[in-house]
């Protein structure tokens, strides 16, 4: 009799604790810890990484304006993502945009899950992507756009360009359902930012003195330091996009590093051969080109494929940068389109090639579900590129036109530009010497 009672007590205890065990089993603490770390790394890419990288590349009279723009965009993007962006990007809607079910994080508590990580963490991780993407565009209009126009453009652009494209690719939209390969933002981040920067550069026109020696970076030490932070932070950018601490994350980090190294060295050696000396600016720019190009492909290609992608990134983005500045005479101040835009396009297309399992040493990990050939995957990749480029270019142009009307012009006056944005816009200086 005592044995039966003991068994009943044990059974009762087990029944009472089952819900606890079920909850623990559904949330993976290891995966959550990795995404917590990745979130910090991606924010680190913007603040201080991108801020320092861009800040060192402009003239000293504008350095503070760049830092200020990065900080302000981080704040605006965070609040808009919390209010509307996350819901429109990732809640259930239609093929083109999500719904309003999760505005202001409605219905999301500390126990809510996205897969096996807290949904609050998933939302925050995606927020860091929403922060860096409009911040990248700063490089296209640096040193000449009004601060009020920067803020208004960034806010509208986030909701009208970034959010819909994110939904198309990652939120259950039409490109993702077609089988588009974009692991960490080749289309969502780099193509959208690059194309928007090009549109802004064209609409604003070149800076006063564009093409002269006076336009050289004022502090390469700052830029190289910022570039190093970008390289480190990119491990969270690409590795974190696996949303798990697993083999996908490990391989994404490995191929990211290989492509960055290959891009940096390729750009360096091209400069060395062409101009007689390798430059620090070219080397770090090649590194960013390698990182931007591998981003979309990082979860689908192997290490040898990543090596080729990095080499191509260094060469193609170098050529695009030279062509844009010397042939087209377009002042994309900090080379956002030729590095991020062209890199994003190149990487998205190459993901369709090097994801194939039939390339021997250069094989990847297979095509998307339902796609059986390289031609089929390449078709989807090309559609993704064309749709993203077209939508971003048209809508960015319209937004800039609207912002120009609301702010009575996008650009500061000639006198203000000569004086510098630090003093004119903020009544401060980056250096008090």
Image (cartoon, rainbow, N blue to C red):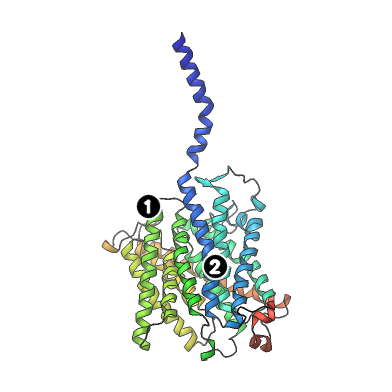
Q: Residues within 10 Å of mark 1 (few under 14, many from 20)?
A: few
Image location (x, y in percent) of residue 337: 50, 76
* Rendered position, 123 above or below 293: above
Residue receiving disc 1? 247
Name the disc covering residue 48, or none.
2
Name which of mark 2 and mark 1 comes first in the sequence. 2
| Position in image of residue 240 (x %, y %) | 46, 56
Q: Quadrant of the C terminus?
A: bottom right
Q: Residue 181 location, x and y as percent?
A: 44, 60
Residue 396 quadrant: bottom right
Residue 180 can be seen, yes or no? no
Q: Residue at x 66, y 48 (%)?
A: 106
Indicate the quadrant where residue 314 lies: bottom left
> In the shown orientation, is residue 273 left or right of residue 107?
left
Relative vertical location of residue 348 with respect to residue 32 in this rendering, above or below: below
The picture places residue 392, in percent across and down from the top left corner, at 57, 70
Whole-angstrom CA distance, mark 2 to mark 1, is 29 Å
């Amino acid at each position: 009799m005592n044995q039966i009672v003991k068994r009943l007590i044990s059974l009762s205890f087990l029944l009472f604790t089952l819900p606890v065990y079920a909850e623990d089993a559904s949330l993976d603490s290891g995966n959550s810890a990795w995404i917590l770390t990745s979130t910090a790394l991606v924010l680190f890419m913007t603040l201080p990484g991108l801020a320092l990288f861009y800040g060192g590349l402009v003239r000293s009279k504008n350095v503070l304006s760049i830092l200020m723009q990065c900080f302000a965009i981080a704040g605006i993007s965070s609040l808009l993502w919390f209010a509307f962006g996350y819901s429109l990007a990732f809640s259930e809607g239609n093929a083109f945009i999500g719904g309003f079910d999760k505005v202001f994080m409605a219905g999301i508590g500390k126990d809510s899950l996205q897969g096996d990580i807290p949904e609050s963490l998933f939302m925050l991780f995606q927020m860091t992507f929403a922060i860096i993407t409009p911040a990248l565009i700063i490089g296209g209009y640096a040193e000449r756009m009004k601060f009020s126009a920067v803020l208004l453009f960034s806010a509208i652009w986030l909701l009208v360009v970034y959010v819909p494209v994110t939904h198309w690719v990652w939120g259950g939209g039409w490109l993702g359902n077609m089988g588009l390969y974009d692991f960490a933002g080749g289309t969502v981040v780099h193509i959208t930012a690059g194309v928007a920067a090009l549109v802004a550069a064209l609409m604003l026109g070149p800076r006063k003195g564009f093409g002269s020696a006076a336009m050289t970076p004022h502090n390469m030490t700052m830029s190289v330091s910022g570039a190093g932070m970008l390289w480190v932070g990119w491990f969270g950018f690409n590795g974190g996009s696996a949303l798990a601490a697993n083999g996908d994350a490990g391989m994404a980090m490995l191929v990211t590093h290989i492509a960055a190294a290959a891009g940096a060295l390729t750009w360096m050696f091209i400069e060395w051969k062409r101009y007689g000396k390798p430059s620090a600016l070219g080397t770090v720019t090649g590194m960013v080109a390698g990182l931007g190009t591998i981003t979309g492909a990082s979860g689908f290609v192997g290490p040898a494929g990543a090596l080729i992608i990095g080499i191509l990134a260094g060469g193609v983005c170098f050529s695009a940068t030279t062509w844009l500045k010397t042939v087209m005479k377009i002042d994309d101040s900090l080379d956002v389109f030729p590095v991020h835009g062209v890199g994003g396009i190149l990487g998205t297309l190459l993901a369709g090639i090097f994801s194939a399992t039939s390339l021997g040493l250069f094989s990847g990990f297979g095509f998307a579900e339902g796609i059986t050939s390289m031609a089929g995957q390449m078709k989807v990749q090309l559609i993704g590129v064309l749709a993203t480029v077209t939508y971003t270019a048209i809508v960015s142009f319209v937004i800039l036109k609207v912002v120009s009307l609301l702010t009575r012009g996008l650009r500061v006056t000639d006198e203000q530009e000569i004086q510098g944005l630090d003093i004119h816009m903020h009544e401060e200086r980056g250096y008090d010497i």
